[in-house]
Image (tube, grey):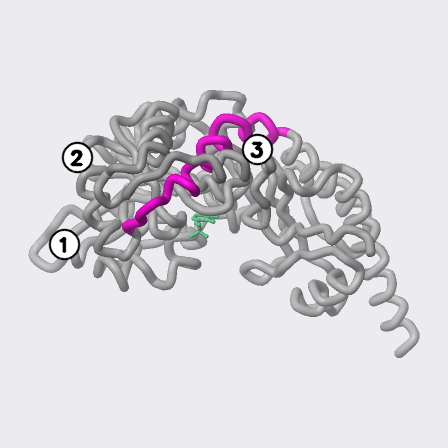
Amino acid sequence: MPKIIDLRSDTVTRPTPEMRRAMAEAEVGDDVYGEDPTVNRLEATAARMMSKQAALFVPSGTMGNQIAIHVHTRPGQEIICDERSHIILYEMGGPAANSACVTRTVSTADGILSWEEIRKRVRMPGDHYRGTGLISLENTHNVAGGRVYPLDVAEEICDRAHELGIKVHLDGARIFNAATFWGKPVEQLVAKFDSVMFCLSKGLGAPVGSMLAGSRAFIDEARLVRKGFGGGMRQAGVLAAAGLVALEKSPAGLAADHGNARFLAEALAEMPGVSIRPNDVLTNILFFDVSEALTCADLSARLREKGVLANGVAGRMRMVTHYDVNREDCERAAGVLRQVLEEARSAVGAGR
Ligand SMILES: *Cc1c(COP(=O)(O)O)cnc(C)c1O
């Protein structure tokens, strides 16, 4: 049985042997009492890497984003974000359900907001509305295909928002991919944001967990909200130990994932009936459409029969590279897709 090539997401990465060893040997305590030395070390390390005063280990990226929204906003306030943001598409209606906020969305081609577009939606509190409570950006942008924020665009948004007294949160689930793309330390990409969430459990390969970073006061409050959301963990050092290895070792491997995604995109672009623009593939996520009359679910099922896993996301096919797939796997995945599309075409031809 050949290896299954799993391109559904970078969340499918399994912990490395080094992570498993660190987990087995982790020193632990009760983190709700603040007594888990490994969690404390992870939080200090993350804060240092982000150049923020403090950081908090949370069970998932969703919880990290939702805690940030809860701390930054008051009920009835508005959150300005891209219409394809993870915080509104894939977090169970969290801004409304958890924080009684409404979203004011911006429609973009590439997931990248500009201050000009945001400014049109900013509202100061008035007799009839609570006004803007938060601006939330996503870098890299998942549903826009792993697109990255130019540093000056993100900085301008933060600066202008701050002049109006509005906080800016960064959903940086894949911020290390963005930093890899720019070849800059991650702290430069997050410097002006009031809070940043990033995932240990995606391309960095840890089995569980995300980090939320910000000012000391923000994280003190976030810790209480985490408890209220049911995210207080006890001997979480076994998880944090893997997170520490992820932070130390994994960023260096992301460039290879980006190279593999670009390689796949170029291979797909050569296939009849596939539409994709390889130059738009900047990091480890690629989206494509096929002209054959196949739904994403059909195509996923046919790929799966041949050992390649890929899903439809927001109505388009998506592939995500990560350290559990190498160049050879990408070659094979491209070959399988080509074969599936040829079979679909000849079936249609035979039916005519
Ligand atoms: C994956 C992801 C998250 C968090 O996801 P969890 O599965 O809850 O860890 C948040 N934002 C973006 C952009 C993501 O891709």
User: Earlier along the polypeptide chain: callout 3 or callout 2?
Assistant: 3
Structural crowding at the residue carrying mark 2, measured as other residues with C-alpha within 10 Å and reported as few (<14), some (14–19) or many (≥20): few
Q: Are marks 3 and 1 in contact (CB under 8 Å)?
A: no
Residue beneath label 2, please? Answer: 217
Give whichever of 183, 116 is nearer the camera: 183
At 36% from the left and 44% from the top, the residue drawn is: 236
At 47% from the left and 35% from the top, the residue drawn is: 25
At 38% from the left and 49% from the top, the residue drawn is: 59
| Region in magenta | 232-255
Q: Would residue 263 appear left or right of 212 to someone viewing this image?
A: right
Helix, strand or loop: magenta stretch: helix
Give whichever of 328, 39 is nearer the camera: 39
Residue beneath label 1, please? Answer: 130
Q: Quadrant of residue 139?
A: top left
Structural crowding at the residue carrying mark 3, measured as other residues with C-alpha within 10 Å and reported as few (<14), some (14–19) or many (≥20): some
Residue beneath label 3, please? Answer: 18
